[in-house]
Structure formats: C-alpha cells, structure tokens
Image (cartoon, rainbow, N blue to C red):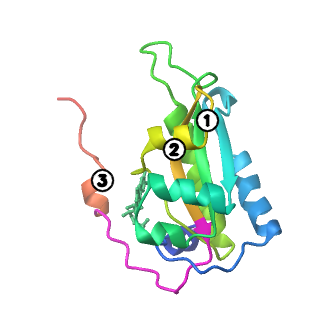
Amino acid sequence: MNFLDLVKARYSVRNYSSQPIEKEKLDYVMECVRLAPSAVNFQPWQFIIADSEDVRAKLCQCYTREWFATAPMYVIACADHSVSWKRRHDGKDHADVDISIAVEHLCLAATEQGLGTCWVCAFDAALCKQLLALPEHLEPIAVVPIGYPAELNVPEKNRKSMEEIIYSGKLHD
Ligand SMILES: Cc1cc2nc3c(=O)[nH]c(=O)nc-3n(C[C@H](O)[C@H](O)[C@H](O)COP(=O)(O)O)c2cc1C
C-alpha cells in the first residue's frame, strides 16, 4: 500500500468487533507512535493503553456514544505540559501539535495493520483525568478506540477541493 492508499484507507471507525488485537500489531502501532517527531524532540507525551473492564467503563462515562463502548481497547493520548516546548516569542505551548502528529501516526499505522481507530476529543477531559487519577501535569487530549472494524465500510472522503485549501495568489500587494 503506498502512502496515498493508506491515507485513503483510514477512516473514523465507529463500530468495532470484539476480536482482540494481536500483541505484535499493538507493538508495531506503538513503535510508530514512539518514532513521531515533536518540537525540539521533547516528546511531551504519555500514552495509556486501556483494555481492562474497569478502565473501559470509566472511559465510557467520559464519552457516552454507544458505538464507543464497542472498542476492545483504547489509547489515551496525554500531553505532558511540564516538558512540552513553548515558543519564545509568544509562549505558545506545542504539546497539542506534538500529540496530534503521534496520534495520526497511530491511526495510520493501525490502518496499515487492518485495524480501525477514531480520533475522539469530545470527551469530558476533566472527568477522565479524575477517574483515571492522572497526575496534574498530564492532560488527556484524545481517547482513541482501536480494534477490528465490525464491518468493512470505507466511506467516501468528504473534503474541500484543492482550490479551496491552497492559496496561490500574492500574499501582499
Ligand atoms: C482532533 C479531532 C477530534 C475528533 N473528535 C471526534 C469525536 O470526539 N468523536 C467522533 O466521533 N469523531 C471525532 N473525530 C473524527 C472526525 O469527525 C473525522 O475525522 C472527520 O469527520 C473525517 O472523517 P474520517 O476520519 O472518516 O476521514 C475527530 C477528529 C479529529 C481530527
């Protein structure tokens, strides 16, 4: 599969089979996460892999969509603001940027392995932090369900056209 085919094959999976994920596949996906780039190579992240009944139930309190509970496993991507790079000029914290790259590595690597994922950010992050007793410096950014899709159903990509997203005019008069 070339990169464009992989990008086309990834989609937000919102229905999972209960088939467990092979350890080698999970290890492969997490190695792709580990090798993601980050600002100044600070790697300001921790990833919690959750498949126990107890933690799955807690996560389902933080994001209550029915489909979410079908996933056999979740990766909670947490930003560590105590080590993330802050831009000198304006103090901008780049933890979210770094986490986003790592999570997309996860999603693409999982797709390559025949697994499905879905970015989930619309969860109750404060509740998640409390229920999982996360330390103060960790912020849960995304909770990514991962597992085998229950059905094979790659939807059409609904995206803006190239003309809409690329500005090729003059920036200034
Ligand atoms: C930062 C981010 C947050 C998202 N949060 C959610 C979410 O909370 N729940 C959900 O069902 N999908 C979520 N999505 C998935 C998007 O809805 C989805 O990626 C988009 O509609 C494009 O569809 P596709 O992933 O199938 O190509 C999120 C995606 C991103 C990148």
In which quadrant of the rendered image does the C terminus lie? top left
Give me the C-alpha separation between circle 1 and circle 3.
38 Å
- Using the rendered view, name the quadrant where residue 137 is placed: top right
Give me the C-alpha separation between circle 2 and circle 3.
35 Å
Q: Residue sitting at 72 percent across and 75 percent down?
A: 20
Whichever of labels 2 and 3 marks the residue nearer the N terminus, that label is 2
In the rendered structure, which amino acid carries the disc numbered 3? Ile
Q: Residue sitting at 51 percent across and 38 percent down?
A: 97
Query: Dot 1: what SS?
Result: loop
Give me the C-alpha separation between circle 1 and circle 2.
8 Å
Residue 153 on the magenta segment: yes
Q: In front: 101, or 16?
A: 16
Do the residues bearing badges 1 and 2 touch, measured as CB atoms within 8 Å?
A: yes
Q: Nearer the viewer, mark 2 or mark 3?
A: 2
Would you name the residue on which mark 3 appears? 165
Whichever of labels 1 and 3 marks the residue nearer the N terminus, that label is 1
In the rendered structure, which amino acid carries the disc numbered 1? Leu
